[in-house]
């Protein structure tokens, strides 16, 4: 599932200071963010489940990233 458009990734890369952006760089960043995001959310879901909840909270996401 694609969550980030190439335009959004291009804009993000440019906001980091790049003057020009190769389309392949935008695609790679999109793929990486989706993969990392999915892994973080899976860990957050496990934390919520362990706490007896079906709702993922910001604390679950924070812990998933920082633990």
Image (cartoon, rainbow, N blue to C red):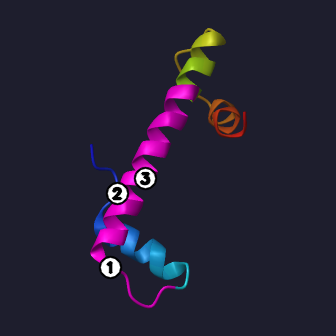
**Disc number for residue 6:** none
Q: In which quarter of the image is residue 4?
A: bottom left
Residue 49 in the image, given as x and y percentages of width and height = 57, 13
Residue under the image location 63 percent in, 20 percent down: 47
Q: Identify the element where label 2 is drawn.
A: loop
Distance between the Cα atoms at labels 2 and 3? Answer: 11 Å
Q: Nearer the viewer, residue 56 or 35?
A: 35
Q: Is residue 46 left or right of residue 19?
A: right
Q: Is residue 44 left or right of residue 7?
A: right
Magenta part of the chain: 18-43
Label 1: how many residues lie within 10 Å, few (<14), some (14-19) or many (20+)? Answer: few
Is 4 situated above or below 17? above
Q: Identify the element where label 1 is drawn.
A: loop
Q: In this view, does 45 lie to the left or right of 29?
A: right
- Point out the tag, 1 or 2, that comes first from the N-terminus: 2
Residue at which label 2 appears = 4
Q: Identify the element where label 3 is drawn.
A: helix
Q: In which quarter of the image is residue 24?
A: bottom left
Residue at which label 1 appears = 22
Between marks 2 and 3 in the image, the one whose residue lies nearer the viewer: 3
Residue at which label 3 appears = 32
Label 2: how many residues lie within 10 Å, few (<14), some (14-19) or many (20+)? Answer: some
């Amino acid at each position: 599932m694609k969550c980030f458009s190439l335009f959004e990734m291009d804009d993000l890369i440019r906001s980091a200071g790049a003057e020009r952006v190769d389309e392949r760089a935008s695609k790679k960043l999109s793929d990486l963010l989706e993969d990392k995001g999915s892994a973080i959310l899976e860990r957050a879901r496990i934390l919520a489940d362990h706490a007896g909840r079906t709702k993922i909270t910001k604390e679950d996401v924070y812990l998933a990233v920082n633990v």
